[in-house]
Image: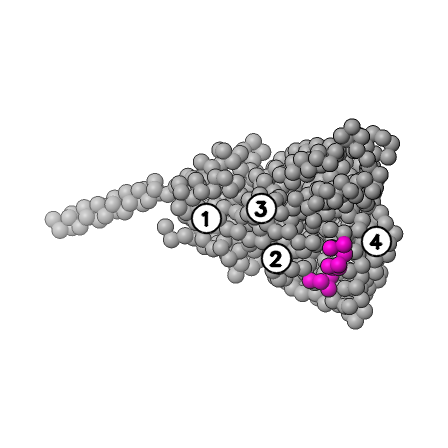
Amino acid sequence: MFYARRGLLLAVLLLLLVSLAGTALAQDEELVFGDLPRSETFIVASQAPHNDVWDSFNYYQAPTYNNATGYANVIVEPSFITSHDFHAWLAQSWDYNEDGTEMTLVITEGANWNDGRPLTMDDWLFTLQYNQENADKGINWSSFLRDVTWSAEGNEIVFSLPEPNWRFHYNFTGIGTFTPVPRHVWEGQDPTTFKNPDAIHSGPYRLVSSNADTRTTIWERRDDYWDPDRMPAPKYMVWLKRPEADVAVFEWEEGNFDLGRMPNSVMIRMMSANPHIKPLVHQDPCPRGLIFNTLTPPLDDSLFRRALGLLLNRQAVANLANVPGYVTPVLWPNLGSPDERYYDAAAAEEFQVTTFDPEAAAALLDEAGYPLVDGARVDKDGEPISLDALYIDIGNPGWTVWAWLLSEQAQLVGLEINPRLLDIPTFLTQGPNGEFDIIFRWFCGNLPGDPIALFEGLHSDYALPIGERTGGVPGRYSNPDMDAIVEQLRTANPASEEAQALFRQAYRLWAEEAPYVTLFGENEGVVFNTEYWTGLEVGQAWVHWTPAARQIIDFLEPANR
């Protein structure tokens, strides 16, 4: 009896110790955003949401989703993810017939939506028809379907094109390109107003909450994700709008964020205070440029536009970026020398494409008929010239200082250029609407072997009246010679010598006309907290604001703490 009682007592004590140990462990586990274990939560602090919408997950247009909620970044999965190469995702491959008038797209089988419903060919075909029928509303992924028909068999969709188009697959392979939507969610909905409140798409997380007051969105990983080999490690993700830098620096020092951007001026302090904070630098494939509104005199004069280009100290701007950038004579999407098969080096020199020469600018203004009168340049009507230069501030001096340096140099030759800071939503509205004189712009979508994006947006198809939103280069440029070249490039195989000769012609015309000018190519830096997660060193973490974030999070692994 004594030994039985002693055994019972020991068992009770053991259970008590185990319980107390578990309680201690639970108490030691840091919880964030209510009850989320910090060690299982990946936190992204976005410094520049493109709007302040936190209750809508409609990726069809910029005003109905927010690139800081994580929805367009990780939940919306693309057909292919482009990261130095094409990675199959919701689609597997594409192929053309001999003359480029048909393209076959092979879709991924076995995928599902994050509400558990299967993602099938029916969803693909519904989305294609839905987008085509709503193209007049200006939604994303619709205009490319004009005059296109398709048929499906098995897991293949065959697109019949109205003319040869060796680039049709670009509509499925770039950042922010076509992706199917769930028919059971979108059928009967207006793509310009529907909010998709449950944030349904095929990504590996489900929506927990999205709070407009705290500007915070929380996601929980779903166990039924369709591709277990790509199941992300974090059980939870939190995407939020970062506080202003002078406040955010304390959050970073405390280890409260895992990924985001911060000004260089505080990086040394942050890394000294928290040894887990590391900078990650990657090349940005979207070089920067300035667009001129060619409907606004004197910006309708190519000589005047070229004179402004000569007033740009591009290297000074590039050196002042958060991570110093580089200057090239063409908005080339890769570091190193641009391929001369696709641009005219002689034209770059002849028209001084990247030259900083205020004296040459003054001479060009004189030649073009804009004389100095009492210290001020006047237009053809004798009125002093005054223009606005629009920019945004995301904490990178390269995005802002150009306007002030241009203003300073312009003043020395008698021009008045007024830098104007806009908030991001206004900037993204006024730009496409043509409501500007000079505006900063990033040029994305260029490929080293096919830089048609540099010229496609200059076709007069995009030269809409001011106030109407355009999808091209928004400077309202119109030139029949450029139209003719672009129309030939649209149907030419970009790898052919014929296409490369056309590219060189387009470049020469662009250099002479200067509807927009190059500024600099950028290297992007982000901040990564390695206390809880590792792995982003091998991913392109700077593009976390795009759908490429879906692939980035696959590199994450728990840190050994």
Q: Nearer the viewer, residue 131 or 325?
A: 325
Of pointers 2 and 3, the one earlier in the residue sequence: 3
Q: Nearer the viewer, residue 538 or 235?
A: 538
Of pointers 3 and 1, the one earlier in the residue sequence: 1
Residue at 45% in and 48% down: 278
Q: Position of residue 379 (x, y in %)?
A: 83, 34
For label 3, the SS is helix
Of pointers 1 and 2, the one earlier in the residue sequence: 1
Of pointers 3 and 4, the one earlier in the residue sequence: 3
Residue type at the position of mark 3: Asn
Residue type at the position of mark 4: Met
- In the rendered structure, find residue 319 and report the number of the disc placed on it: 3
- In the rendered structure, find residue 278 and report the number of the disc placed on it: 1
Is 38 left or right of 413, judged from the image as shown? Answer: left
Note whether 439 is above or below 343 in the view shown. above
Part of the protein shown in magenta: 339-350
Q: Position of residue 296 (x, y in %)?
A: 82, 37
